[in-house]
Image: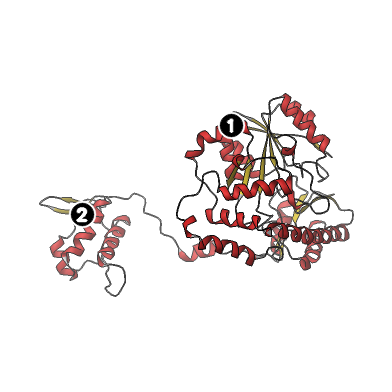
Amino acid sequence: MLYDFIITDKSKKIPLYRQIYISVRNSIENGTLKKGTKLPSIRRLSSDLKVSKTTITAAYEQLCAEGYIKNKPQSGYYVEAEFEIKPKSYDKDKIKHLQKKVYFKYDFSGKSIDEKIFNLNEWKKCVKEVLNESYLLTSYGDEQGEETLRNALQKYSLGTRSVNTTPNNIIVGAGTQPLLYILCSILGNNKKVAMADFSYIQSEFVFKSFGYNVNYFEVDDYGVTVKSLENIKPDIILINPNFTNKSGANMPVTRRLEIIDWARKNNALIIEDDYNGELRYRTHPMPCVQNYDTENTIYLGSFSKVLLPSVRISYMVLPDKYLKLYNDIKSITNQTASKTEQLALAKYIESGKIDIHLRKARRIYFEKSRIILDSINKYFNDNADIVFNETSLYVSLKLSISPDRTEKEKELLNNSISIMPYKRENNVFGLSFSGIPENKIEEGIKLISKILIK
């Protein structure tokens, strides 16, 4: 007797018992073998397929273990499972099509950095040194972050951003989002948050995931207004002092001190998202808010644009009063950042390579900012207002007209132009210069102007 539903091929590397198991399982899943159907005996199937009884037994036992068939003593094997909905089969060609990456001729999305900035060979050396010290990699990493990295971050953040902390107060994670999840876990639920309506959208997602009431504060040329905080009465204030105002300029120290004072008097917590704070290159970076308020400000720093977007390492500095709350849950949290990359970053910082990298980054981004601003002024004339923030490495264009945004974005894509994936208003477009080559900026802006203001 031949069993068409069982396909075996002795030339394949897949064990025969596995081939038989897969054939029977697939036949049950697609409905060819109905529930209650009696399967051929081990002896008969062994004889007909010309394979050993051990092979058939192994296949049947695996099917029994997974509940596809059942062995009834002195009766035989019967189909036990029944699928009302057939398991989905995937079209490999379709999957390949969906996974195909799209490359843009003019990439103003801000999802990459300039290749000229980062010396990949130096980074590889640091990674190789870590890999050669294999004893470091044969254990789980520290939940809080590798001690050598936290020591390096304490010195680095003090030197570049005047962060006043100890290594013990630093928590490392694979990006700002995982760190905010930890923070919200220790802060608890039912909090009211005040933040800018153009803030880090991932942070807003985290807050809402914990049931926080998210409110948008008002800003003027100096940043968040104390009057709007008074109206909202938040428990948490999320700010980026490098870009929390209409002009895109740094928040002056007087406004920073006003916010700190209001937060103290109203028992509110300040979260300072100092995204790219060390990349200011037209003016000298000023001390972070945490420098003026170590007791009530939580500092967030990131290396996604400072170093490499693919190196997902961020860090959070907790005041002492929140450190005990973190220590209570520390043992049940997992470290999300790669131990190898943490140790490599520690070496990169301690060797002074990051200082060389920052000087180079500031020089290149300064030139690119000049090119994009000159190009916008040249091709947009008076058809758009410009807000420039150097630490975020992008320019906001507010058109004097209100176009059909959907049509404009479609036309940009058709011309191989990618812009930042954010929208504050229908006529506001974000253009980052972080990843696009210098020689493509002007022609890209020229093309964008033709599309947006025609």
Front tag of 1 and 2: 1
Q: Is residue 245 above or below residue 40?
A: above
x and y percentages locating residue 60 in the rendered image: 22, 57
Q: Is residue 208 above or below residue 172?
A: above
Q: Is residue 99 above or below residue 425?
A: below
Q: What amino acid is found at the position of numbered circle 2 in the picture?
A: Thr
Q: Secondary structure at mark 1?
A: helix
Query: What residue lies at 55% left-to-right and 50% top-to-bottom?
Result: 337
Give the residue at the far right of this rendering: 382
Q: Secondary structure at mark 2?
A: loop
x and y percentages locating residue 449 in the rendered image: 81, 59
The disc at residue 37 is 2
Give the residue at the far bottom of this rendering: 11
Q: Give how far apart the Cα atoms at labels 1 and 2 are.
A: 58 Å
Residue indicated by mark 1: 187
Proximity of marks 1 and 2: CB atoms separated by less than 8 Å = no
x and y percentages locating residue 346 in the rendered image: 61, 54
